[in-house]
Image (cartoon, coloured by chain):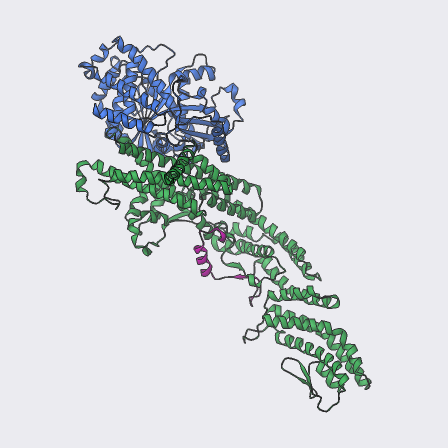
Amino acid sequence: MLHDLISAVKGIGGDMFVGKEDFRFEVSNDLGFLHPSEFAIVHQILNIGTHYKKITNFCNTYDIVRVNTDKKHRCGLYLSSLAAALLKTAQTFHTTVVELEYRLLSDPHLPLSELLLTLQPTAPLLASLSSLVTQIEEKNAHGCMILEVLHKHTANSVAHVKQVLMRVEQEVHSVLFDQLTHWLLHGLLLDPHHELFIHFSSNEAPSEIQQMDALSLEGMENLSLSPECMLRLEMLPSHIPLSVAEKILFIGEAILVFEREAKKENGVVDTAAVSSLSGQVLKSREEEFKALINTLGQEPTFSIIQFSQVIETIRHCISQELWKLVMGAGLVAEVGDLKAVFLLGRGELYQTLIPSVTPYLLNSAPNANFDGLFQLAGRQVLLEEGMLEKFTLSLKTQLTQSSQTKEQPDKSWRSLRLDYHAKWPLHKLFTSAVQDKYNAIFTFLLDVRRAQFRLQQLWITQMRTKFQRKSEADRLQWTLRHHMSLLIDNIQYYLQVDVLESQHWQLIAEIGKTHDYQHLVRAHHNFLVSVSAQCFLNNTLVSNCLQHLLKLIHKFCSILESLFNNDSKGKNALLLPVLPLGTQPVLLNSTEQIKELNEAFERAAARLFFVLSNLRLHQGSQYTSQLIMRIDYNKYYSKNTAVRRFKPALNDI
Amino acid sequence: MPCEIITLQLGQCGNQIGFEFWKKLCSEHGISPEGTLEDYATEGTDRKDVFFYQADDEHYIPRSVLLDLEPRLYNPENIYMSKQGGGGGAGNNWASGYSQGERIYDEVFDIIDREADGSDSLEGFVLCHSIAGGTGSGLGSYILERLNDRFPKKLVQTYSVFPNQDEISDVVVQPYNSLLTLRRLTQSADCVVVLDNTALNRIATDRLHLSNPSFSQINSLVSNIMSVSTATLRYPSYMNNDLIGLIAPLIPTPRLHFLMTGYTPLTTDQEVASVRKTTVLDVMRRLLQPKNMMVSAPLDRNTQHCYISILNIIQGEVDPTQVHKSLQRIRERKMAQFIPWGPASIQVALSKKSPYIQSAHRVSGLMLANHTNISALFERTLKQYDKLRKREAFLEQFRKENMFAENLDELDDSREVVQHLVEEYVAATTPDYLSWGLNQASTESQS
């Protein structure tokens, strides 16, 4: 009977101790060999057997890395290394049992309690291991997640069990370290079973998502990362902090940027220069880092502090190298170019572009060669060729969706999009997600600029008619135009000086201070965030106000433009039945319209002032008060809005 | 290339300041006296094309037309000189200059047309002249009127030199000339930058400690103002890229288009060290001080004179965040008084400096301001005119010309226009300026 029991402990059932599906054993006491008092002892021993059987079963299933033939059993490096480690541990138990068997053979009167006594000390370990195995199977844990389960288990265990588990953990971690070594030092992702928390994603899916939330700034988290490599958060063990994982991702990617794409993008011409750079990124310190990771792997305990430190050391080195590379590629000049074109730093370019693009957008000719016009304008203002080539202007063709596009040329202005062709290695810094942010700001700035342009053009027409008309209507046109243009000018000065120039100044200062690529990325990111915030792009209340004002201004310009057009044609006005702007006939009621517009504009301006003042009260942000001061320099609006708000109150009474 | 500008230099004074202006532009753009680029200037991003065009042989040639009714030492290509020779000229007589303008219209406008055809998209004309002499005032007035007809969509800006009140002029009919020119400046120019010789001389003596300032010293002050006020056009920047963008915001209503200028730091070489640490606030504060203004207008205690608009062009190494702080300080301390009838502000344009000219000043600034007190200058002209007119002095010179042969209505009309201008400036200091214009209009249409 004891023999049967021992073989049951080894996992082999017999007639008396019948093995069941769930690794349990059933005692068939039909023959009545067992005294009831022995039952308890037998059960305890059998429990140990159950655990052992479970473990060995697990080990046998996952022992070898197999090609993924059947869906039921997943396979992977982590699983198999765990299995191997467990098997090693189970070996000690196995020897204990074998020794016991020898003793039983030599001493047939060995009592049942002796069996229990010998096996009992191994019970906690086996129980713990078996619950580990159960958990892993239940959770269907895979890859790095095994580490998490294992780590938790280790942390919660004590004494001898803990030591054994630590050994197991160390062994499984070595798989991670192995993968990381390849990734961190060579940018190689050796992960056939998708076990690591880093993966290459396919290119199409994410880019679309990024376009969707281009306007919201929350999506900027991963802006420095290329769409190809991504973190897989569900695979990230919870004992490795996200920040460390991000660093790991960054390092490997950076190496990819250095070594692979350098060759790809620079072609044959530059290979000499590039390869001299690329090969050496880590060459000098490669051995050092390898040793560091190795020592990590040999540590008996997994210390997250040490781990992070090593990662940080490597990251720092890489980041500095990247910094050198990016600065060598003329980052500062490039940022300047972006500001010049995206952020309207070169006013004369848009001064030329706006009138040349206008007719095409008015007649909604989406097939027009906008880039050609852009390049032409650039050449006209003698923009440097090299700078011009980097940008293309196009019309995003969503026009087909709305049928009313012909009446809304303003909309198509908003669909103008600039593309910037960043050269290696700057393309990691100016990804398409970043360019979307730039474009959002660009659209707003262009709208303001265009309003300013149209108002200025009106000025000269008005100036020419100054001594022919002296009516109230005329005076109103002048004052309204002047108010509009002052407001726009002040907003423009705010945007260009207080926001863009200042932020750019700060960005350049930041770039000058740091020697770390990731700091650069962050500085640039901060630059974009604060610029969009200070353009009020994220504040719907203010931006709605601004949009409304701009709309009124464009309306006013359209009315006056057609009015003056008719004027200059004089008596031939009748021969021109079609007004070029597609607005309603304005000849007769233009005075009325302008009166209305004046009302609406004053109201809208007052509202903007009111909204901004409220915002200043609640948020107290500096830029809000800057804009207020620009608009309200001689306190005209603060006086007038006070009066305006007082008036309706009186009427109510 | 967009926003090109043609400079017209009229008469002795106009040609002198024009000459200084071109000298200054050439040195700022690194263009040698032969019209070729200096070796150090080939890489610049500056926009030479605004004021120069490039001939086939790559030489840079100023877009300028030099007009004079008396032959002088000049001899460049683009020049119109009266063929009458030494005996002719306008004789410091507005009427003579004006009527000669009628006679030489075709020839002059042939030159201007040719120059205009040579530019891709001409934005406007800048006219340099004096309002006191004969050619600059008379011929200048005539050309102003014709430019409007001929180029209705082009801007016309003038740099007009007003005579020095502190010294006795040898031109006795100066008040007549000034008044007649002022009428054209009011009616036909889009923007007049007033250069007051009185103030310029005072600045030269008081601030620059020149006991007897020479013409060229004064003119270099003027050319400095002209070059800085066009700096935003010539150096690429985010705003004020064209003439209209520069002047339109300053001019709220059609007739109030006379601008004062101020410049700082005004220093002689000895004082250079003390201004080295100038800040943006220093510059902007000094620009608001009357002693730095290039227009001398006595304080009028009856009227609360105020700024209609201000544009500061700041050059040098400027931390842009300082601009806001300076604006705030000026506003808190109420250093500038603004009109009560509409929004107004100090606009600040940051502009680049020529890299080829070494300057000891870290920051320098030019102010273009529309200030109601400029009416004092016109009032002075009116007073002097009235004095002369009461005595019917020197009128026979004018009667010689057709325009004044039958009657002197032209003088009376001009006086009314200038008087009206003064009144409008005074009215602009009051809150109900906007309706003032209307009353005036209705009374005029009744009469």
Q: Is residue A505 above or below residue B393?
A: below
Q: Is residue A246 left or right of residue B83?
A: right
Q: Quadrant of the C terminus of chain B?
A: top left
Tell me which corner region of the image, top left, top right, bottom left or bottom right, holds residue A49. bottom right
Q: Is residue B164 left or right of residue A575?
A: right
Give percent across and percent down for residue B86.
Answer: 26, 13
Q: Is residue B368 above or below residue A320?
A: above
Give percent across and percent down for residue A649.
Answer: 39, 39
- The residue segment tinted magenta is A189-218
Tell me which corner region of the image, top left, top right, bottom left or bottom right, holds residue B228. top left
Give percent across and percent down for residue A313.
Answer: 63, 52
Q: Is residue B430 above or below residue B94?
A: below
The answer to whether residue A504 is visible is no
Q: Nearer the viewer, residue B334 or B11?
A: B334
Q: Is residue B250 left or right of residue B173?
A: right
The answer to whether residue B222 is visible is yes
Q: Quadrant of the N terminus of chain B?
A: top left
The answer to if A214 sits in the magenta stretch is: yes
Say which colour chain A has: green
Q: Is residue A578 above or below residue A11?
A: above
Query: The chain drawn blue is chain what?
Result: B
Give percent across and percent down for residue A142.
Answer: 59, 68
The single residue placed furthest to the front in the displayed view is A653
Q: Residue, x 31% and y 40% (percent of image)? A: A597
